[in-house]
């Protein structure tokens, strides 16, 4: 189940990046170097790399403001 709000495409060039988030996050959490992970995933453009490196997961903070059902 995906619980993040990662952009599907890069804001600058429009390349598909949303499908790489789960692998990137998992590998970085396991201790791999983020730059090497991005290279392995084929993310070469600096604009796309910025999208993944600078993403902050805010979904859990936003959930606290939803109305209960």
Image (spheres, grey):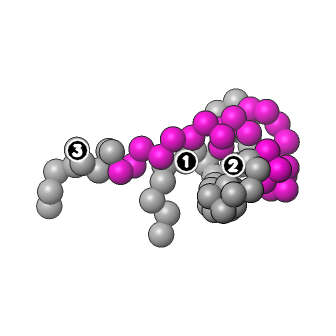
Does the segment drawn in magenta span residue 56?
yes
Q: Which of marks 2 and 3 is nearer the N terminus?
A: 2
* Quadrant of image for the C terminus: bottom left
Q: Where is residue 56 in the image (x, y as percent from the top left)?
A: 51, 41
Q: Which residue is drawn at 69% across and 49% down?
A: 17
Give the residue at mark 2.
17
Q: Which residue lies furthest to the front in this view?
A: 31
| CA distance separating discs 1 and 2 | 9 Å
Dot label at residue 23: none
Q: Earlier in the sequence, mark 1 or mark 3?
A: 1
Chain part drawn in magenta: 35-60
Give the residue at mark 1.
6
Give the residue at mark 3.
65
Could you tell me if the residues under marks 1 and 3 are in contact, i.e. CB atoms within 8 Å? no
Q: Where is residue 51 in the image (x, y as percent from the top left)?
A: 65, 38
Q: Residue at x 14, y 57 (%)?
A: 68
Q: How crowded is mark 1: few (under 14 residues within 10 Å), some or many (20 or more)?
A: many
Could you tell me if the residues under marks 1 and 2 are in contact, i.e. CB atoms within 8 Å? yes
Q: Can residue 12 be seen in this view?
A: yes
Does the segment drawn in magenta span residue 13?
no
Q: Which residue is drawn at 84% across and 56% down?
A: 40
Specify whether 45 is left or right of 47: right
Q: For numbered disc 3, what is the local secondary structure?
A: loop
Q: Is the magenta stretch mostly helix, strand or loop?
A: helix
Q: Is residue 19 visible?
A: no
Q: Which residue lies furthest to the bottom in this view?
A: 1
Specify whether 62 is left or right of 29: left
Q: For numbered disc 1, what is the local secondary structure?
A: loop
Q: Position of residue 48 (x, y in %)?
A: 73, 38
Relative depth, front residue between 2 and 61:
61
């Amino acid at each position: 189940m995906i619980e993040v709000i990662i952009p599907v495409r890069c804001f600058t060039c429009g390349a598909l990046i949303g499908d790489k988030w789960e692998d990137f996050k998992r590998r970085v959490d396991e201790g791999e170097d983020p730059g090497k992970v991005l290279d392995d995933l084929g993310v070469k453009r600096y604009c796309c790399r910025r999208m993944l490196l600078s993403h902050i997961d805010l979904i859990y903070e936003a959930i606290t403001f939803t109305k209960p059902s």
